[in-house]
């Protein structure tokens, strides 16, 4: 926990208000009133820090940091590479990205820079170095914030300029060694796509190659490596004169970057959370998606993370932007803490007067100072976090279940020309994760490289691509007593999108032999019966054969594959593996995972059945301390029965066998 306390505050942009000196003192006063103890500075301040090439203006920032320190407000200091000043793009147009169609971008927006560009790297290194020398050892500067939402450029996050093309070719040479190896791995005899010279290789684009799935997959990997290398370059630069840890703010299920690669240079994971609360009256889908994102971020380093951005009210960039209803700001803030966050930080402290985000939610609006519902909500969160800091220090969630969520599989399965062209990998993941969430069973979302040995249960929905070594890790996990669940259209291809031949890589573990995959229309939807109840089988139906010792728990009931296994269980070593051949609905997944949780010996921390819309998480310390968060995402009161005797960790109240929750309430219990 940075600074020994839960961080509360957020993005502060005083560089936008330098012409209004009274605003800063008013901000400091209101920060203290709202319980703000930390702000992020300089995120998009390049033009104010370096108004012309080589001339740095740091005195204004020095004054801000010093004054905040006097009020015991800590600073997360950003490197300002997220948005380039116009003097830079005017003098060095080569720093701007080139699109896949070959057109170079015009100046503007953000992250509109080539990550390969030597000029861009030189200019930001010089500025980063100067910032670190001036501020890197200030007492109240606690963390480096590297750039902002890397790769988030309102569209394609990559650059296709000739520098990037050459870097891509060098990356491929390092990976494959020879063109013969590359042609073999990419199956380039297809359509006579065999390369005879490295210079023939070009990134995928609308007027060129867009049908080679292996090329597209490697381009995505290269782009992640290139952006990660840029981030690590910035980190190395600021750490020349500073020993502060570094973070970079991630985003909600951002497809453009493999965060398992980007995390390697970072000390702390942080992310920006903007759930679509109140899109509908049922808040559970938004709560599930947000919880899953929190689980991704925590699992990246198996450690507490930071909620770097959230909104205290509404946002400004969806078609409709509802305000948070009473109670939701506290609940959403506590949801982050419940899943392992050591902060609740906002975008933004004060609304700007102009620009793209002038109507985005903020702690302070344009007119009303502290006399707003939002300010009062934020102040209430600040008080609660201040009281919880010491208690939650050195605690984090330690789930015994995991779900495989892998970026490379995401890229591959959604690009494949397979039984369906509308795969939504994230929705597949969320449908399975929701069954865990509703039962109050926490799960880490980890990639295929993760160590599985600490888990009792691992689920791998739509695990189309298998990385090298993954099948061996799963085999060892199950043999050692773990329970493994996977679905149809899993284990189809290797790392370069080549189909496996001969047999499925986990045929011995799963106990099935896949043959065909049907993608039935609604008129041909199938069905199967599980534990006495009939469920739909639709969209994707795997036709498999069970091996001799495999238990068939359910079979298809219709069409030419009636009688073929729909759900199987196979014992392997000390563990067992389940195969879900049919895509079905949430009702089935609830029933199925309910049985699997029992067989895995998993139960929620309350050991109670949870009403719809209520979930629980648990943060534990190495010293044995446990804190259970009980969250009600319904806009009405609910009661949780059968909890035994529990003590409220904040009020000291004792609950006997039942816990009544108000609408949108989070209660923290001692474990």
Image: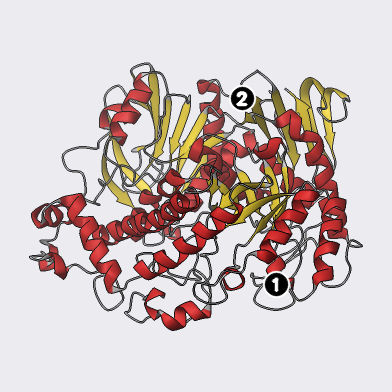
When asked about the image quadrant of residue 322, the answer is bottom right
Q: Which residue is mark 2?
A: 603
Give the colour scheme of this rendering: secondary structure
351 left or right of 240 in image: right
538 left or right of 307 in image: left
When asked about the image quadrant of residue 450, the answer is top left
- Where residue 166 appears, as percent x and y from the top left, is 23, 66
The residue sitting at the top extreme is 574
Whether residue 187 is visible: yes
Q: Is residue 127 above or below residue 433?
A: below
Rendered residue at 74%/39% (across/down)? 631
- Asked whether 302 or 73 is in front, the reply is 73
Rendered residue at 10%/64% (across/down)? 194
- Where residue 168 appears, as percent x and y from the top left, is 26, 62
- Asked whether 577 or 256 is in front, the reply is 256
Identify the image quadrant of the C terminus: top right
Say whether marks 2 and 1 touch (CB < 8 Å).
Answer: no
Q: Which residue is mark 1?
A: 16
Secondary structure at numbered mark 1? helix
In the picture, the disc for residue 321 is none
Q: Is residue 346 above or below residue 556?
A: below
Q: Earlier in the sequence, mark 2 or mark 1?
A: 1
- Where residue 415 appears, as percent x and y from the top left, is 34, 60
The label nearer to you, 2 versus 1, is 1
Secondary structure at numbered mark 2? loop
Rendered residue at 43%/26% (across/down)? 483
Measured in 3D between alpha carbons, the distance from the residue under mark 2 to the one under mark 1, in whole angstroms, is: 51 Å
Mark 2 crowdedness (10 Å alpha carbons): few <14, some 14-19, many ≥20: some
- Where residue 163 appears, as percent x and y from the top left, is 28, 70
Identify the image quadrant of the N terminus: top right
620 left or right of 352 in image: left
């Amino acid at each position: 926990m940075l600074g020994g306390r839960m961080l509360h505050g957020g993005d502060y942009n005083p560089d936008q208000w330098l012409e209004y000196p009274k605003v800063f003192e008013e901000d400091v006063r209101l920060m203290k009133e709202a319980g703000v103890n930390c702000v992020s500075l300089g995120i998009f301040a390049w033009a104010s820090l370096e108004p012309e090439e080589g001339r740095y203006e740091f005195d204004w920032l020095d004054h801000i940091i010093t004054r905040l320190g006097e009020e015991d407000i800590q600073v997360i200091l950003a490197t300002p590479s997220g948005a380039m000043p116009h003097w830079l793009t005017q003098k060095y147009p080569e720093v701007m990205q080139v699109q896949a169609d070959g057109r170079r971008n015009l100046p503007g927006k953000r992250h509109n820079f080539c990550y390969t560009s030597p000029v861009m790297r030189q200019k930001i290194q010089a500025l980063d170095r100067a910032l670190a020398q001036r501020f890197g050892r200030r007492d109240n500067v606690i963390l480096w914030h590297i750039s902002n939402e890397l790769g988030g450029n309102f569209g394609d996050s990559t650059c296709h300029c000739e520098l990037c093309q050459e870097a891509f070719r060098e990356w491929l040479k390092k990976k494959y060694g020879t063109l013969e190896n590359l042609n073999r791995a990419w199956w380039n005899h297809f359509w006579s796509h065999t390369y005879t010279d490295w210079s023939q290789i070009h990134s995928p684009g609308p007027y060129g190659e867009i049908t080679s799935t292996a090329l597209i997959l490697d381009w995505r990997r290269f782009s992640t490596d290139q952006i990660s290398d840029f981030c690590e370059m910035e980190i190395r630069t600021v750490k020349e004169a500073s020993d502060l840890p570094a973070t970079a703010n991630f985003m909600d299920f951002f497809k453009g970057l493999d965060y398992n690669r980007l995390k390697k240079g970072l000390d702390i994971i942080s992310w920006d959370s903007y759930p679509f609360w109140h899109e509908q009256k049922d808040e559970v889908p938004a709560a599930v998606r947000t919880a899953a994102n929190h689980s991704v971020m925590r699992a990246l380093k198996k450690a507490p993370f930071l909620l770097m951005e959230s909104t205290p009210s509404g946002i400004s960039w969806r078609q409709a932007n509802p305000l948070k209803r009473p109670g939701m700001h506290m609940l959403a803030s506590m949801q982050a803490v419940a899943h392992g966050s050591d902060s609740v930080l906002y975008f933004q402290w004060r609304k700007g007067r102009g620009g793209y985000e002038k109507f985005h939610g903020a702690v302070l609006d344009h007119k009303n100072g502290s006399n707003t519902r939002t300010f009062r909500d934020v102040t209430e969160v600040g008080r609660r976090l201040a009281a919880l800091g010491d208690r939650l220090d050195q605690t984090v969630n330690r789930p015994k279940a995991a779900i495989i969520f892998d970026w490379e599989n995401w890229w591959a399965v959604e690009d494949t020309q397979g039984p369906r062209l509308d795969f939504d990998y994230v929705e597949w993941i969320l449908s399975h994760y929701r069954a865990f969430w509703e039962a109050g069973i926490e799960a880490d979302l980890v990639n295929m490289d993760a160590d599985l040995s600490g888990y009792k249960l691992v689920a791998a929905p739509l695990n189309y691509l298998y990385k090298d070594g993954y099948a061996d890790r799963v085999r060892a996990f199950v043999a050692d007593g773990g329970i493994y669940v996977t679905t149809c259209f899993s284990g189809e291809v290797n790392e370069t999108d080549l189909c496996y031949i001969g047999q499925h890589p986990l045929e011995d573990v799963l106990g099935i032999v896949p043959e065909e995959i049907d993608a039935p229309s609604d008129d041909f939807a199938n069905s199967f019966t599980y534990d006495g109840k009939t469920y739909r089988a639709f969209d994707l139906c795997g036709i498999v054969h069970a091996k001799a010792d495999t238990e068939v728990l359910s079979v298809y009931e219709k069409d030419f594959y009636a009688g073929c296994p729909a759900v199987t269980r196979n014992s392997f070593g000390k563990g067992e593996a389940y195969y879900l051949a049919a895509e079905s609905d949430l009702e089935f997944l609830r029933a199925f995972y309910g049985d699997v949780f029992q067989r895995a010996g998993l139960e929620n921390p309350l050991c109670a059945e949870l009403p719809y819309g209520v979930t629980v998480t648990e943060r534990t310390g190495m010293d044995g301390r446990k804190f259970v968060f009980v969250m009600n995402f319904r806009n009405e009161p609910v009661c949780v029965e059968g909890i035994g005797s529990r003590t409220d960790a904040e009020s000291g109240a004792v609950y006997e066998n039942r816990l009544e929750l108000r609408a949108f309430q989070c209660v923290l219990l001692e474990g």
